[in-house]
Amino acid sequence: MQNFHAVTVKEAVQCITPYLEDTSQPSQHIYFDGWRGLGASAVLTSIAEEPPPSVRHKFDKIIHIDCSRWKNRRELQRKIAQKLGLPQHVMNILDKQDEEDDFSGADEGSRIEIVAVGREIHQALQGQSCLVVFHNGSTNMVDLNDFGIPQPADRWANFVRKVLWTFRGRLHAIPGMKLAADPTRAPSTSNAESTKPSNGNQTRTDQKQLSRENVPATEGVNVDNSQVYLYSFLEDSESEQWNGLAHDEAAEIAKYSRKLGVTLETAALCCKYMLLLNSRGVDTLDFNWATHASNYWVCDGIIQEYQQDKAWEVATALLEEVKLEEFSSYKLPEFGDKTRWVVATDPYRVEEIKPETTSFFFANNRGQGVASLPTKIFQRSAEQLHVLKLCLCTFSFSSPPFLHCQKIRFLGLDKCKDQPKKLEGKEEDDRRKNNFFQSLWVLDICDTDWELDLSLNIIESMLQNIREIHIKRERIWSNSNAWTWRHVHNIHKLRVIEPTLHWKDEGKDEEMKDEFMNMSKLELLDLSGNSTIKALPRLSGATSLSTLVLDGCIGLTTVAPEELPPSLETFSFDAGEGKQYNKKAKISRISMAGCARLENFRLRGSLPNLEELDLSNTSVKTLDLKDEVVQVSFLQRLILLGCEQIRAILWPKAGMPKLVVLRIDTRGGTEVARSETPHDADYSLVISKEHEEMCLARVAVTDMRLLQSLLLAGSNKFC
């Protein structure tokens, strides 16, 4: 483990160059950890794309493999083949195996490298020295020899001189690492899955995984005994240098998001926003970056040079380039604009918000109770404050201290309590004139019961302008019945998770089912944990809806196509989610028939009452009904008509003893067209069952490989 002092990417490249030039160990591996994880990806990219002349002349090939956004091992091998410009027949081998894995139901993440492609890679590198620059976006160590690239101590070692690599993806840090088994790597004894000769006794350093511990990244890490481990160190006080590194890391993100017009300056501000806030509040605040990072960026005004819808599209593209799995505890020295973006965690020391502050996050870190929010801290922030999140504090809900902040776009309340206050005179007049709600784009309410004591006009105006509403536990409501989903016309994302105010979907409230009909811009609807809902709101008018999540909606009895829009792409029903997980799900029928764009269909948990599942005319590729995923032991009817994309059906271990109707047709087209198809293309089967007199199975396929899905895994018995 060797440390060097560098304050820029350029200086780090200069420090690493001698290790690349050194030929005393011609097959050396060099691991670079960056500055506490930051900047490693930018340094590797600089070396690969703009190598120093001495490095360029040292190697016949410099192979840059950027797998920061990890998919699987086969995709890594595909990128190597592409970088080497291997002929199309090699790429066809990869495509064909992917297709075979589709029909066998193999999970995307488990797909491994192919020996035939590895041989082609070996052949292409014979007699050439090369430098491999590898961004490993997985959490597993990778032996590149398995993919066809030689490693130290191999008989091919003279072909490869150096491997420079990092685990760090873009804006990705793992504070501490230790070695553990890699469950996805192919066994070394399988000739079909590895190109590396093995005597069976060899220690496999690549069968390891990096996992996290609360220690600095530069301590206690043994990535590989044969590798040089490099890192650079900066003092916490060197804020200008930290800013520069964040800027370089942002350049990586901007490069991969350039198609949407993302500028380096915008990407840099977004990165610094996350790093600064996380460094100051990660131990106290839940920023919920996965859900709200893009909202913060747009609402704060960082991304503003676009029309509003375009701004969110750009923010989403940026977020996709940032790995958030490890980001929640990514803590670096404080740097960035500390007056524009503020985190306060001590109610006794919180200062008045400055006029230039655009984002303010407050949480009480003194004990578990709520703290009174100082009333005067918002006096000078009325014009510029756009993002406000308050956690574990109490204030008057009828006259909040931020009442005069007329440009708040994001309002988040987490575990906040009302502090009743009698209003008189000017305070009451101000409350009645309250219109800060009308500027809101995003409302995020968690564990907070907020009654909106506002006029009908103000509430309706707020609902017409708001873009996203997130409610988790508790509720937001109005005694005047002004709060109604019927008025939310501009909504794009709606999450109502485990609310205390449940849907009224019975009897005289039949009209409540039509409240979502006019949400033509709605893209995501998450009703997780609504355990009392019995009927799904009619969504056929939500013509932009792409994601529907009904996890924990165990009171729901039916999902029918007449309630759904054809735009749906993702559907999830997990009976094990929510507080009522110990109760049986009542759902008896799920039909997504006609949702032509539906690709991601997810069933989880115990569904003892489900009798019919219809996915006709959808784009689902794999239907997973395995015991460890979902329990549907009483399923009687499975219908997959017009499913042109279906590749695999994964059955429970014991099959489907109650199944009486199985209809599969992958030919596409209408019912009439299918009925007119020549009979010789129609494979009709009648399958006897032990627990039923007979199961009528009518199967028509365009690819015979799908018929293997009718057999139970590991046997020759039909499902």
Image (cartoon, helix red, strand yellow):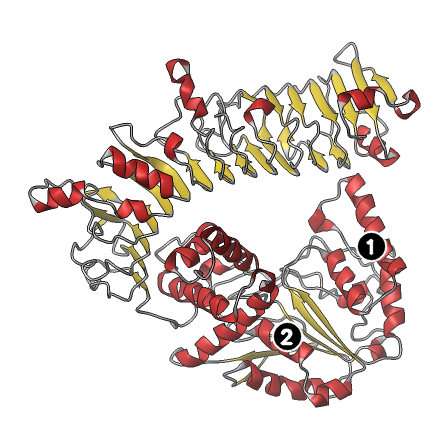
Report the front residue among 343 and 488: 488
Report the front residue among 109 and 421: 421
Residue at figure coordinates x 34%, y 47% from the top left: 440
* Category of crowding for the residue at label 1, using alpha-carbon neighbours closer than 10 angstroms: few (below 14), some (14–19), many (at least 20): many
Quadrant in the picture for the N terminus: bottom right
Q: Quadrant of residue 4?
A: bottom right
Residue at figure coordinates x 45%, y 52% from the top left: 308
Does 133 sit left or right of 453 as displayed?
Answer: right
Pick whichever of labels 2 and 1 is earlier in the sequence. Answer: 2
* Category of crowding for the residue at label 2, using alpha-carbon neighbours closer than 10 angstroms: few (below 14), some (14–19), many (at least 20): some
Q: Is residue 450 above or below residue 147?
A: above
Residue 52 percent coordinates (x, y): 67, 87
The reply to whether dot 2 and dot 1 touch (C-beta < 8 Å) is no
Q: Secondary structure at mark 1?
A: helix
Residue 108 visible in the displayed image:
yes
Give the residue type that dot 2 points to: Thr
Residue lying farthest left? 425
The residue that mark 1 highlights is 94
Quadrant in the picture for the C terminus: top right
Q: Secondary structure at mark 2?
A: helix
Total numbered labels: 2
The residue that mark 2 highlights is 45
Q: Is residue 652 above or below residue 246?
A: above
